[in-house]
Amino acid sequence: MIVSAAMSLDGFLDDVAEERLVLSNAADFDRVDAVRAGVDAIAVGAGTVRADDPRLLVRSPERRAERVSAGRPASPLRAVFSPSGELDPSARLFDRGAEDVGGRVVVYTSAAGARACPLGPEAAEVVATAEREVDLAAALADLAGRGVARLLVEGGGTVHTAFLSADLVDEVHVAVAPFLLGDRGGARFVYEAAFPQGPGRPLRLAEARAIGAIALLVYRRVNVLYVYAPMIP
């Protein structure tokens, strides 16, 4: 599993302005597109759907063609974690128009969220994993049953925190922008939690390079002490 994010030097994924803050550049977007093309599913939290309105598609026609020639969908399966099920049916992620080259959309939610979710079956498949939370273990088991061996998690901070604190992440890809947001910062890369990747078991730096003004850092875990899959409240 890969966690991928672009953030400011002080760890923010966005600022408090209404317009989305661009933290990366075209070359890094293309790098992320290549990572997307190599996975089986892309996942985000409901907050990312609301804030960024992403489509989570492989953008490059060449990469889409390579996936199709290998017998795979042009873009990976797309997943959303939403305990409340409160998602806008008009979000681009759920638009299955003719130009959509994406795989299926699966929403992992709670039993209460499934009852409240306004999405129809033509937009997404809604899967309840627990009564009032998203059970990550159940969601990952469901993804595995769909043939997902390699998952890319693209945000936001609540989802990053859940997967990292559960020690489920194999790689962390962070693109760091050359500025700080301070009191203008909004969502964070991670929030307070008991992380196993502490000083006693740090991640291993696998890559560090400049992409224009952006610093790309790739970390990998060295070993696994335990795996605990929590709920996303």
Image (tube, helix red, strand yellow):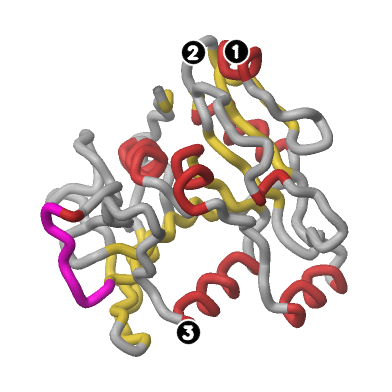
Which residue is under mark 1? Answer: 111
Q: Earlier in the sequence, mark 2 or mark 1?
A: 1
Name the quadrant containing residue 68.
bottom right
State the SS at label 2: loop
In the picture of the structure, the residue carrying the numbered disc 2 is: 132
Question: x%, y% of residue 218?
Answer: 35, 69
Pinpoint residue 223: horizontal percent, then vertical percent. Answer: 34, 51
Which amino acid type is shown beneath numbered disc 2?
Arg
Picture quadrant of residue 172: bottom left
CB atoms at circles 2 and 3 under 8 Å apart?
Answer: no
Q: Which residue is mark 3?
A: 27
Label pair 2/1, CB-CB below 8 angstroms: yes
- Residue 179 colored magenta? yes
Q: Residues within 10 Å of mark 1 (few under 14, many from 20)?
A: many
Crowd class of label 3 (few under 14; some 14 to 19; many from 20; radius 10 Å): few
Question: Which kind of residue does numbered mark 3 sit on?
Answer: Ala
Could you tell me which residue is drawn at 60 percent across and 54 percent down? 150
**Residue at 71% from the left image edge and 50% from the top image edge:** 77
Q: Which residues are magenta?
A: 177-183
Which type of secondary structure does the marked residue at label 3 adopt? helix
Of residue 160 and residue 170, the one placed in the foreground of this image is: 160
